[in-house]
Image: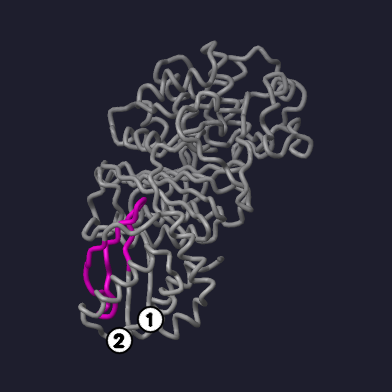
């Protein structure tokens, strides 16, 4: 069944269609619907012109429509829309469980020589997403292009924020076919986007004068650091502390590869700081999960609270993020299962003492609330997280948590991505014109095509700037 969807997509573009009058198209389309609803896929195959039959043999035709029926059910209503490119008719097609656009082209013998089924998209939606869950045709094509390489059972959940208003779009790949679904409330691991929330907690402590950004964390912990090494909050937040990506006493080759952080506890972190702490390239940008995890741990010690409680009390409740947590036992909604490279479900990661580096589970609905809050220029703690603290290169600065992209647009973009064993995510905002994209997925961070999630995020963001 692999690549059947791709065959359908290319048939429309590669075939030279004949012009056909609507009455003939109507007869063919009605017969197609009747045969589909009657599970008579052999009859559908008999409606194909030679070029279609050669490209999609009868067994593949039967397999494709059987899978389609399983996923979306019968056709309940069909409405003619228009002729596109002067060659094929398009129809808004209501299935029992979704709405697609059906494109059919016929030759002079009333045989189907072009067929495409794809998610229905309203016309003239370009700049108004508000509450309608709608995307533009260009955005749809970008989404489907980036998702094609991923395994079956992949889910992508997207929030598109335009002029401060948000709309949602979700897709799922099943049986080598991509369908639109409703998943704005579905819960995913957000991975390193958690670092933005840890830095927001840090900013909260600074604004409330509990600490200063340039303070050393040594002054707030009872642990003696090896060689009395000093480590500051600001250097941890912008990845210039010199700390490695992971602590040296976290040996991923000896841990459970499907849940590598679970058994790394407070005692292990304290042991690292006291016995193994080493800094390299201090003052240079060196991305560190350990560093941001250490911020979360230190703030929890200062407040005598858990990292989870800090998030709930200072961020999630403030922005009405009701489906966000670091504790999988608190998940009440639909948890999307993470996938490995082959598309098989794998266990969720549990971060323990390093939760501040990547331990949050959330939804695009919740994250879009947090993104929109960034547009409030009077919010001091969020504004502080976006303030430049270090220049990485001519294309990127770092704030507190946020990476500040200088070359993607005429405006600054504030961005962070995330990845765990079963999930990948990406989030970008433009506070000047109040645009943003949030993407959560169950694509493994180890999937060779996982960069498509960031590419999708940036390409969708660029569509919001188009006139």
Looking at the image, residue 133 sits to the left or right of residue 250; the answer is left
Q: Residue at x 36, y 79 (%)?
A: 112
Quarter of the image for residue 414 reads top left
The magenta segment is 78-102
* Badge 2 or badge 1: first in the primary sequence: 2
Q: What residue did someone put label 1 on?
A: 113
Q: Quadrant of the N terminus?
A: bottom right
Q: Helix, strand or loop at disc 1? A: strand
Residue 22: image location, x then y, percent: 21, 78
Q: In the rendered structure, does residue 247 fall within the stretch colored magenta?
A: no
Do tag 2 and tag 1 residues touch (Cβ < 8 Å)?
Answer: yes
Q: Residue at x 49, y 68 (%)?
A: 62
Asked if 351 appears above or below 160 in the picture, the reply is above
Q: Which residue is mark 2?
A: 18
Under circle 2, the secondary element is loop
- Residue 53: tell me if it is visible: yes
């Amino acid at each position: 069944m692999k690549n059947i969807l791709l065959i359908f997509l290319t048939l429309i573009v590669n075939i030279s269609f004949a012009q056909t009058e609507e009455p003939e198209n109507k007869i063919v389309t009605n017969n197609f619907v009747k045969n589909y609803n009657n599970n008579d896929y052999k009859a559908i195959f008999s409606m194909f012109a030679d070029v279609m039959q050669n490209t999609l043999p009868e067994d593949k035709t039967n397999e494709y429509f059987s899978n389609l029926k399983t996923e979306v059910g019968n056709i309940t209503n069909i409405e003619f829309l228009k002729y596109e490119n002067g060659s094929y008719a398009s129809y808004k097609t209501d299935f029992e469980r979704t709405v697609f656009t059906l494109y059919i082209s016929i030759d002079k013998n009333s045989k189907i020589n072009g067929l495409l089924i794809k998610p229905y998209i309203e016309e003239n939606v370009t700049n108004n997403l508000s509450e309608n869950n709608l995307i533009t045709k260009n955005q749809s094509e970008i989404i489907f292009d980036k998702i094609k390489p991923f395994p079956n059972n992949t889910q992508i959940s997207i929030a598109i924020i335009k002029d401060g208003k948000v709309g949602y779009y979700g897709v799922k790949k099943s049986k080598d076919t991509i369908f639109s679904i409703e998943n704005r409330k579905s819960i995913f691991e957000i991975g390193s986007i958690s670092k933005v929330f840890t830095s927001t907690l840090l900013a909260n402590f600074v604004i409330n004068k509990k600490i200063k950004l340039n303070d050393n964390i040594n002054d707030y912990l009872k642990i003696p650091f090896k060689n009395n090494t000093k480590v500051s909050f600001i250097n941890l937040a912008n990845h210039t502390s010199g700390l490695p990506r992971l602590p040296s006493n976290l040996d991923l080759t000896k841990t459970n590869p499907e849940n590598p952080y679970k058994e790394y506890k407070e005692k292990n972190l304290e042991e690292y700081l006291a016995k193994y702490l080493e800094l390299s390239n201090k003052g240079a940008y060196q991305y560190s999960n350990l560093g941001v995890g250490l911020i979360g741990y230190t703030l929890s010690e200062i407040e005598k609270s858990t990292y989870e409680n800090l998030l709930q009390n200072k961020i999630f409740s403030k922005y009405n993020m009701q489906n966000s947590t670091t504790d999988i036992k608190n998940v009440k909604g639909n948890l999307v299962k993470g996938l490995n490279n082959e598309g098989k479900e794998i266990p969720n990661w549990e971060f323990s003492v390093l939760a501040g580096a990547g331990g949050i589970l959330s939804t695009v609905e919740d994250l879009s609330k947090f993104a929109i809050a960034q547009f409030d220029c009077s919010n001091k703690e969020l504004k502080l997280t976006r303030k430049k603290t270090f220049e990485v290169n001519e294309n990127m600065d770092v704030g507190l948590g946020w990476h500040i992209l200088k070359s993607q647009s005429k405006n600054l973009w504030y961005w962070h991505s995330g990845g765990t064993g079963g999930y990948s995510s990406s989030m970008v905002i433009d506070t000047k014109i109040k645009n943003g994209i949030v993407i959560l997925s169950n694509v493994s961070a180890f999937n060779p095509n996982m960069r498509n999630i960031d590419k999708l995020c940036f390409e969708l963001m660029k569509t919001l700037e188009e006139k």
